[in-house]
Amino acid sequence: MTRQLHFGLHPYGVGGPGSDGLWKDARVAKNASVDIDYYIDWAKLAERGLFDAFFIVDSQFITADYPPHYLNRLEPITLLSAVATHTKNIGLVVTASSTYNSPFNLARRISSLDHISHGRAGWNVVTSFDSQVSKNFGLDEHLDYATRYGRAQEFVEVASGLWDSYEDDAFVADVEAGVFLDRDKLHALNHVGEHFKVAGPLNLARSRQGQPVIFQSGVSEEGRTLAARIAEGIFAPGQSFESAREHYQDVKARAAALGRNPGHIVIIPNGSPVVAATDEAARARAREIYEEDNDFDRKLGFLGRAFGAYDFRQHDLDAPFPDLTHLTERGGRRGADLVNRARENGWTLRQTVEVVSEYKSPPFVGSPATVADEIQRWFEGGAIDGLNLAFRVRDELEYFIDAVVPILQERGLYRRAYESDTLRGNLGLPFPVNRYTRQREEAAAVVPAADFVSA
Ligand SMILES: Cc1cc2nc3c(=O)[nH]c(=O)nc-3n(C[C@H](O)[C@H](O)[C@H](O)COP(=O)(O)O)c2cc1C
């Protein structure tokens, strides 16, 4: 089959980063981020657009300076369990931190979502960007990069091991023979590693798609290495064709070097299209959105996120940007890059806020044909396998589905019907055969040497 685009949708309710003035829009319900009917409605609409996944991002630390959607939002697995019962084909991807969860608990909850949705669950493995989350989980400090990513890898290995606890035909439920379970097909994990000790087995069988699909979204060196090892889907930043292409090529090459099939990793960067009847109208709308959101004080407040929720208001705006490198070592490299740029350019704090919030024309702005052209250019140019889309309001999502999707379908770049009713099936990912079944089959296929000699 020819390669086709994959779309996700990540909803931001009353407004996320970059859309924090959204709550003022008369079309947005003031409780959207905690209203399950809002999520169900958007997921059903995305399903009408044949999107692969409905994607819930998450974090577990806030200050009053965080975007409106972050301040008051539903827990992702609970949310998606409700959405699952109102949808049939669209994948349901939950963001959950490997730093602030334990593998048995999380593997069980995500597997439950996989059952509730009949094989449509995915897990976006994050290591947590907000360093202050640690304070909500009994730690004084966020774990450093190496520990966080080492833990993430082991976490996924343990979860995957637990998900294979039962072979697919373990429950014979033979009433006449009085046998409910084939005991040989239940396996304890007995994992003892650097970060976790988990005996297993998990008290839940595999779903129709075998195991939930693993997504990843770190972009640092450690993040890319982890993605190449374990990710089946990647949610990446998508600021420009060049940066998306560099990331795409790099992660696929790393995966290939590890012996993986790069075609089995679906990379869908962030995309927030602005579509209007003409290119000119769309460009004007993109500029208008920027003006609506461009509030200096809010930008100053949220700048502190990459520095462990640091309060920049305590500094003179016209003094040189303070050297806070020590606050960026654990939270995210984004903060450290900013300190370096400010130092190299001799920016004040005010200038730094202005630079990070200055208007940059986003990708995918234009008429339906222009936006379809641009998506096609990125897709065929080796930068994306699709996009994880965000829209400000329902009308804009609907317009994309009704105006852009048909053009992509016409060009043979996008499905006309779902191929499958599992997330794995729609993403074109292979079914993971249970590891114990595979071992059994491999052992049976090998003719033992002694038998061969005596035959
Ligand atoms: C597109 C994208 C989406 C992300 N979504 C989340 C999220 O919802 N929750 C979270 O804690 N971290 C999220 N992250 C952060 C990453 O998981 C990671 O912790 C962070 O980027 C710092 O690691 P890095 O320096 O390896 O990127 C996201 C990152 C990217 C690039």
Image (cartoon, rainbow, N blue to C red):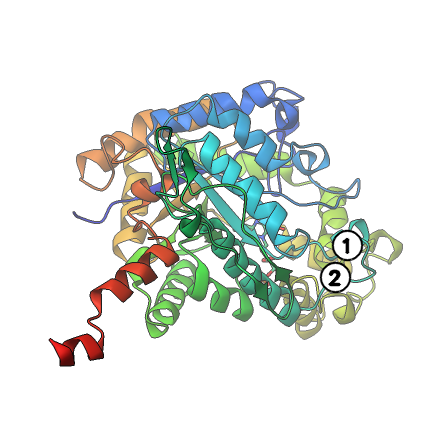
Which residue is depicted at the point 29% across and 40% down? 372
x, y (%) of residue 448? 22, 74
Q: Is residue 412 visible to us here?
A: yes
Badge 2 is on which residue? 142
Q: Which amino acid does label 2 sit on?
A: His
Which circle's residue, 1 or 2, is located before the other in the chain? 1
Residue at disc 2, CB closer than 8 Å to ligand 1:
no
Gap in angstroms between the C-alphas marked 1 and 2: 7 Å
Q: Is residue 237 visible to us here?
A: no
Please say if the residues under marks 1 and 2 sit with CB atoms less than 8 Å apart: yes
Viewer-side residue, 104 vs 99: 104
Badge 1 is on which residue? 132
Which residue is depicted at the point 66% across and 65% down? 338
Is 55 displayed left or right of 356 in the figure?
left
Quadrant of the rendered image containing residue 444: bottom left
Mark 2 secondary-structure assignment: loop
Crowding near pointer 1: few (<14 within 10 Å), some, many (20+)?
Answer: many
